[in-house]
Amino acid sequence: MESFSLFELNEYVRRVVALNFQEPIWVHGEISQIKESRGNWYLEIIEKKEGSEEIIAQSSAALWYKSYMFLKRKIGPSISSLLQDGIQVKLKINLDFHERYGLKMVIEDIDPNYTMGQVELNRQKIITKLKEEGVYDLNNSLELPSILQRVAVIASERSAGYADFMKQLEQNAYDYDFEVALYDSAVQGRNVESDFVAAFADIADNLEAYDCVVIIRGGGSKLDLSGFDNYNIASAIARCNLPVITGIGHEIDETVSDMVAYEALKTPTAVASYLIDKCAYYEGEINQLSELLKLDTLQRLKQEESQLKLIQQEINLAPKSLLEREKLGLETTIRSLERGFRSLVQKEDLFVTKAETLLEVMDPKHILKRGFTLIKQSGKIVANAKSIDHKKKLSISFADADLEAKIL
């Protein structure tokens, strides 16, 4: 049976490829790995099955130094944002097959519009999914604490944005103290998603330690910020039980992470100013309430002092008033007693006069003068004949003389 050597087979494939792909072609896919060596770039391009992470195609690509310099002049500084892990790219390539090294795509051009379109398409899918899940406005609906001093910060410790943020906090004009817990994370590239999701998981286990979460990144192009157009990061922000404040460092573009956060600010220093202003506003309210309390206290003290003076005056006047009332009552009682006594004396005088008159009228002398006599026996008045003792003498009193008589 006839057989081919591996070299013969690969040579045949090379001729087939060279014959069928004589002109450059456009290919799109995702950069899974990329590295640079001596000005040349080496990429692994993959294609995933729609709706999953399953890789259904993979190939190597090379961007030689001259082509890279051409693209840098054509596209500008954003070329570095295109050449990153996880970026969807559309490449103009020459297909090359080498008997030893196999199939390789040699890059001649890159279409940045395709990448930006894919980024925007991905953004819209993420936004729609978050809204369908009902979490899009969750974080924004949280109640912001009155003061934000215990801050969980997700940022790259080596980034200029984090340094600016910390400088602004530490040198605040009010001399406020902030407790900052840094979750050192990648802010660009393939590790952004895993670092951020892990940071939010740890924060969720320590909610009572923080007042809010801050995300810091220092500037960058739209593609540099594409890591924040990520479903898992946006979902973690939306579902966080603490208010999330972003300062990702862009002036125009808004990432999905910004959209679902409680507050989205332009720069790291703007976030620091926001925290400081929040504390200053709270302190101002406290000072205002303190002044109002002082004024209210002084007013109440004045009212109580006036009331106390009135009471004191009443107390001072009370004994005199009481004495006057008692004196008046006593005088009234005395007058009443005097009237009563005089009335009683008058009654008694009248009674005595009447008694004297009656006694005078009833005096035996006056009775005897009218022709009556008074008969006594043994010194006792004889009231009836039966009581007379016939053996004893009688004494008969007339008005003008007393006589003795003997009963025969």
Image (tube, helix red, strand yellow):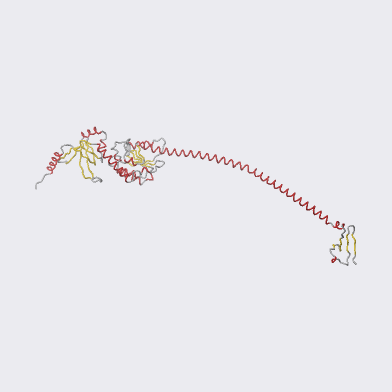
Q: Position of residue 203 (x, y in %)?
A: 35, 45
Q: Nearer the viewer, residue 34 or 82?
A: 82
Residue at the limit of the structure toward the left, as seen here: 1
Q: Is residue 166 left or right of residue 407?
A: left
Task: Look at the image and tell me in which quarter the C terminus lies.
Answer: bottom right
The mark total stands at 0
Residue at the limit of the structure toward the top, as seen here: 73
Residue at the limit of the structure toward the front, as seen here: 370
Q: Is residue 119 above or below residue 345?
A: above
Q: Is residue 147 above or below residue 380?
A: above
Q: Nearer the viewer, residue 362 or 58?
A: 362
Q: Position of residue 347 (x, y in %)?
A: 76, 51
**Looking at the rendering, which quadrant does residue 325 occupy?**
top right
Q: Position of residue 162 (x, y in %)?
A: 34, 38
Q: Position of residue 324 (x, y in %)?
A: 66, 44
Q: Is residue 317 left or right of residue 292?
A: right
Q: Nearer the viewer, residue 40 or 304?
A: 304
Q: Nearer the viewer, residue 2 or 54?
A: 54
